[in-house]
Amino acid sequence: MIIKCLIVDDEQLAREMLQAYLLKIPELELVALCKSAYEAQEVLKTQAIDLMFLDIQMPQQSGIDFLKHLGLDKPSVIFTTAYPNYAVQGFELEVLDYLLKPISFDRFEQAIQKSIKTLDTTYKATLFEQQKELEEQFLMVHSEHKHHKIFLKDIIYIESLKEYVRYHTTQGKIIELNSMKRLEADLPKHQFIRIHRSYIVALLQIQSYQHGKIILKLPLELPIGKTYKKAILEQLFK
């Protein structure tokens, strides 16, 4: 599991120290360094951040005020501060840890291991909810003068046949007059991904990735189109 991180601190030396620590831990990926809450807000608009290292005493807006104004879909937070008197507020805001400056690498690593366990538990719970949701969702597919009910959990992959598409499912194959563009827009993004102009695959059916190909559990190899490679790697290794 790769944890995408954001460092927010108005002091350059503090940012550089946290960056150096972060680069020593392979599970962590640094997305951005910010010197203010405003800069951090701009990053959060465009990037998916899992863990934010947030200073408290900053000009214009404190880390506490910034965190209070973030919505429900906010990243997990570790406070980094020279002041011990904000610990209670940190607890109330449900931060993962509270690091007092100067921060030793051992203390930093301890906080990271704690965070990895918490985030891993959250990630697994999210996957469970997504799987539960997937089991209840279905498509109505018109084929051979009939309407077929296809549960999303049964779809392995979808193949383009020009004006038609072929659904490869655990129950068999069904051909329908439809477009890949329409299906890509309609299918849940956290459950399906376009890997090629001719293929959409179910994420849960992917076994591995190698040499520009996706290996499905069937087993079956499908090519990855150059246009889709970056999005696929981001989805598989996020």
Image (spheres, rainbow, N blue to C red):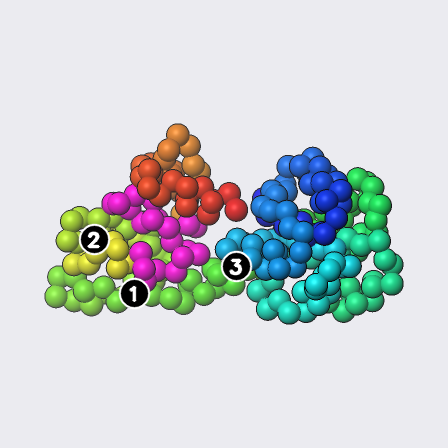
Q: CA distance from mark 1 to mark 2?
A: 13 Å
Q: Is residue 103 above or below residue 86?
A: above
Q: Nearer the viewer, residue 172 or 215?
A: 215
Q: Look at mark 2 in the image and give the residue it sits on.
A: 165
In magenta, the rendered stretch is 184-204
Q: Look at mark 1 in the image and give the residue it sits on.
A: 139
Res 104 quadrant in image:
top right
Residue in the picture at 42% in, 50% down: 203
Q: Nearer the viewer, residue 5 or 189?
A: 5
- Circles 1 and 2: CB distance less than 8 Å? no
- Circles 2 and 3: CB distance less than 8 Å? no
Image coordinates of residue 7 in percent, x first then y, are 67, 49
Q: Is residue 82 left or right of residue 148?
A: right
Q: Nearer the viewer, residue 127 or 211?
A: 211
**Which labelled disc corresponds to residue 45?**
3
Question: Which comes sooner in the sequence, label 1 or label 3?
Answer: 3
